[in-house]
């Protein structure tokens, strides 16, 4: 189960809406081993595409080094889908390399619905998990 603050959920949705019609992507870091998402890190979609995302390699290296320096890890890795449901694509599954991360997807296809879902992806197996949103 993913437990996330209302503010962090709102940050993810706002980033997804702001980057629409392109996919948005980013990370929420938290203390290593805690499973607590705390620090919102929006990232650049290097593909600038409505159907695909990829972290910019230099930015990803910088962000992962910064997390290491702060004794953090990527608790949530998120991105948006602009025209389809919030469910991992085959490409998303193949790129999922953080076994302990929650993979959050937001669909921006409907401007009145913030479809927000979380998944665990391990060895190509996708498991949807409950999301609990808590106040600050």
Image (spheres, rainbow, N blue to C red):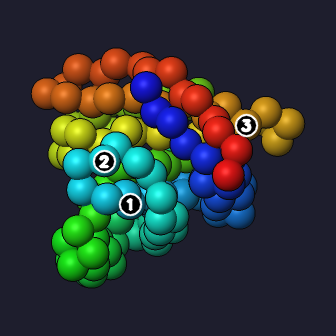
Find disc 2 in the rendering and name its residue: 34
Toward the left, the furthest residue is 123
Find disc 1 in the rendering and name its residue: 29
Q: Position of residue 27 (x, y in %)?
A: 42, 59
Residue 47, image quadrant? bottom left
Closest to the camera, between mark 1 and mark 3, is: 1
Q: Residue drawn 58% across and 29% down?
A: 132
Q: Residue drawn 19% across and 29% down?
A: 122
Element at label 3: loop
Q: Earlier in the sequence, mark 1 or mark 3?
A: 1
Closest to the camera, between mark 3 and mark 2, is: 2
Q: CA distance from mark 3 to mark 2?
A: 27 Å
Residue 96's place in the image compared with 130, above or below, is below
Q: Is residue 33 visible?
A: yes
Relative to 128, 20 lies left or right? right
Q: Earlier in the sequence, mark 1 or mark 2?
A: 1
Seen from the viewer's position, the closer of residues 134 and 62 is 134
Q: Residue drawn 43% across and 26% down?
A: 1
Element at label 1: strand
Relative to 11, 65 lies left or right? left
| Disc 3 packing (10 Å; few <14; some 14–19; many ≥20) | some
Relative to 103, 6 lies left or right? right
Seen from the viewer's position, the closer of residues 122 and 29 is 29
Q: CA distance from mark 1 to mark 2?
A: 10 Å
Q: Earlier in the sequence, mark 3 or mark 2?
A: 2
Find disc 3 in the rendering and name its residue: 114
């Amino acid at each position: 189960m993913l437990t996330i603050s209302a503010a962090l959920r709102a940050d993810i949705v706002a980033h997804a809406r702001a980057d629409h019609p392109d996919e948005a992507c980013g990370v929420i870091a938290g203390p290593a081993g805690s499973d607590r998402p705390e620090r919102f890190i929006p990232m650049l979609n290097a593909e600038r595409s409505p159907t695909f995302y990829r972290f910019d390699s230099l930015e990803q290296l910088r962000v992962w080094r910064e997390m290491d320096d702060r004794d953090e890890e990527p608790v949530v890795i998120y991105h948006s889908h602009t025209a389809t449901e919030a469910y991992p694509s085959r490409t998303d599954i193949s790129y999922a390399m953080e076994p302990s991360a929650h993979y959050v997807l937001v669909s921006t296809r409907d401007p009145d619905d913030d479809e927000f879902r979380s998944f665990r992806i391990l060895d190509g197996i996708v498991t949807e998990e409950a999301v609990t949103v808590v106040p600050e």
